[in-house]
Image: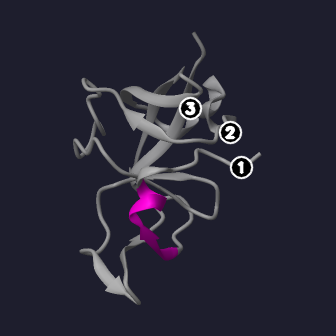
């Protein structure tokens, strides 16, 4: 079994790791845990680059800070954010989007449902 840990932020101060497993050529989220950025760097989690979809398993505990279990958002800076925060969904030119600010770089952008649910955990 192939497994790894990707980093995510629920807020600018709340970093956590998400344990993912490779199943049927895709990644699934199996566990999440609080971790500070220095320890994550020491463990090498800050350098993990994976792509694909990251659906949660049925018993995935979700974000250890807000409890969110479904969405992740991928920022153009290459980092992952928790689904918490952001605006209420709005319709822009027939596309439902939410506005979110990246907890890593501070940039604000619009995310579609696909951007949130089919998040990439890094760019190669």
User: Could you tell which of marks 1 and 2 lies nearer the N-terminus?
Assistant: 2
Q: Is residue 48 above or below residue 68?
A: above
How far apart, in angstroms, are the residues tagged by discs 2 and 3? 14 Å
Please tell me whether mark 2 sits on a helix, a strand or a loop: loop
Which residue is denoted by mark 1 in the rendering? 123
Quadrant including the C terminus: top right
Which residue is denoted by mark 2 in the rendering? 49
Q: Residue at x 29, y 57 (%)?
A: 84
The image quadrant that residue 68 belongs to is top left
User: Could you tell which of marks 3 and 1 lies nearer the N-terminus?
Assistant: 3
Depth check, mark 3 against mark 1: the one in front is: 1
In the rendered image, the residue lying farthest to the bottom is: 93
| x and y, in percent, of residue 18 in the image | 45, 32
Which residue is denoted by mark 3 in the rendering? 40
Disc 3 packing (10 Å; few <14; some 14–19; many ≥20): some
Q: Is residue 101 left or right of residue 24?
A: left
**Residue 100 is a magenta residue:** no
Disc 2 packing (10 Å; few <14; some 14–19; many ≥20): some
Residue contact at pointers 1 and 2, CB within 8 angstroms: yes
Please tell me whether mark 3 sits on a helix, a strand or a loop: helix
Q: Is residue 123 above or below residue 96?
A: above
Specify the segment rendered in magenta. Answer: 108-116
């Amino acid at each position: 079994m192939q497994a790894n840990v990707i980093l995510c932020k629920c807020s600018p101060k709340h970093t956590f790791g998400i344990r993912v497993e490779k199943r049927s050529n895709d990644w699934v989220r199996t566990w999440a845990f609080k971790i500070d950025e220095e320890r994550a760097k020491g463990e090498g989690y800050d350098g993990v680059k994976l792509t694909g979809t990251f659906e949660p398993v049925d018993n995935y505990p979700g974000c250890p800070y807000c409890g969110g279990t479904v969405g992740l958002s991928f920022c153009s800076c290459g980092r992952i954010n928790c689904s918490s925060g952001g605006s209420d969904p709005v319709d822009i030119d027939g596309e439902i989007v939410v506005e979110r600010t990246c907890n890593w770089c501070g940039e604000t952008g619009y995310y579609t449902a696909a951007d949130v649910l089919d998040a990439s955990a890094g760019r190669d």
